[in-house]
Amino acid sequence: MKVNFLIVGCGFTGATFAERIATQLNKKVLVVEKRNHIGGNAYDCYNEHGILIHKYGPHIFRTSSPKISSYLTSFCSWRPYFHKVLALVDGSLVPVPFNLNSVNQVFPKNYAAKLEDELIDKIGFNKTITIHKLFESKSPLLQELANYIFEKVYLHYTKKQWGLNPDQLSPSVIGRVPVRVNRDDRYFDDWFQAMPTQGYTVLFEKMLNHPNIHILLNTDYKEIVKESTYDQMIYTGPIDEFFDFCHGPLPYRSLEFEYMTLEEEYVQPVAVINYPNNFEYTRVSEFKHISGQKHSKTTLAYEYPKEYVIGKNIPYYPVLNDETKERFRKYEKEAEKISQKVIFAGRLADYQYYNMAQAVGRALRLFETRIMNG
Ligand SMILES: Cc1cc2nc3c(=O)[nH]c(=O)nc-3n(C[C@H](O)[C@H](O)[C@H](O)COP(=O)(O)OP(=O)(O)OC[C@H]3O[C@@H](n4cnc5c(N)ncnc54)[C@H](O)[C@@H]3O)c2cc1C
């Protein structure tokens, strides 16, 4: 087959490139996807009970970028959705990220009032601080609070999630844990928080519905690359695999999802409950809270972190630390040598934790800099 662009992978990165190239440049694109569906990890589908589920874990869309939100809202309608997460701590379900409501739930009234005054006085009302900054505080009360949150909400969750101690991970992973000096129970603070009304797969269908875009599912690009004629490749798969692991494999953490459907309308008060200290699973998600779907039954997903084994399970989260970043840089140098022919982008090719909006944003940026004006 002869095309202008061969795109490997049909997640948000691949689909954004395909849509832009087809509509803005009127060029032909072949998207090759090894799974049997479009959408990458954001893929959703109806299960045997007719409930919309996310096959690769709950995916909540949010962004503070007007460019990204207006790009994606041009394809379908969106339903405002403010994600909330509770964590089981000392027998009660408390809002996370930890905020003033959480403080009042876990501590006795008088002590909670003291902590609240200290947080407002030392950090400021409506401010957000990372757990690490809280540790560095000179106030003994705030240090105690940091210890409590670290131990009860963070330490064991991190060990379960990553199979590592927090100090074995990059500060970029650790730094993501905020503490909020307000009563805002929403998990995210981006101004655009919404879900595609008919789900992600319909959004992808709309993005990819163009005569210039041809999609080949159930196909590893290696099976067709030698017979394909193309000017440029956009590769969104794992970068180490592209270079036959010549600098060694890049480590990932994998997950396993166990689904359960119950004859009840709702089981949980919110979409996600974290279990930092109990059970083998890290969290339980109830999809109907996220989709807004009305149904007499409900489906839950139990999430078990697993060791990643190449070829056996799915690479979900890059394990970022100094050593793995250094290994990635070696692959980046290999990529630079072939940059005229291949563009590497996406969470697997960039070996980065991108949320969906970041994946779209990077694809839009690279389309402009490397393809339109390249
Ligand atoms: C458990 C979990 C929960 C998440 N929750 C959220 C959330 O709530 N909100 C949010 O914004 N983001 C979330 N994310 C991140 C989100 O999944 C990513 O931002 C998004 O998937 C990135 O898109 P991508 O196209 O770069 O990668 P992917 O979606 O992974 O797409 C890459 C595609 O390439 C294909 N591929 C790989 N190798 C080959 C090959 N050799 N040949 C052919 N095809 C190949 C893969 O099969 C895959 O479909 C979550 C991620 C995980 C793991």
Image (cartoon, grey):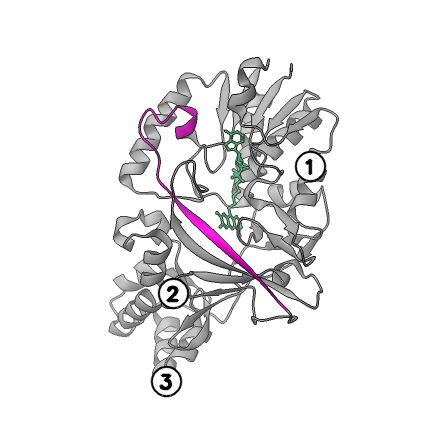
Q: Is residue 248 magenta?
A: yes
Whether residues under marks 1 and 2 lie with C-beta atoms below 8 angstroms apart, the answer is no
SS type, badge 2? loop
Relative image position of residue 229 (x, y in whole percent): 59, 13
Q: Which amino acid type corresponds to the residue marked 1 in the rendered image?
A: Met
Q: Residues within 10 Å of mark 3 (few under 14, many from 20)?
A: few
Q: Secondary structure at mark 3?
A: loop
Q: How many marks?
A: 3
Instruction: Indicate which disc, 1 or 3, sits on the residue closer to the N terminus.
Output: 3
Q: Nearer the viewer, residue 336 or 6?
A: 6
The stretch in magenta equals 240-262
Identify the mark at residue 137; answer none if there is no mark.
none
List x then y, in percent, for residue 4.
Answer: 63, 17
Q: Is the Cβ of the residue at disc 1 closer than 8 Å to that at disc 3?
A: no
Is 304 within the magenta? no
The residue where tag 3 is placed is 108
Q: Which mark is residue 276?
A: 2
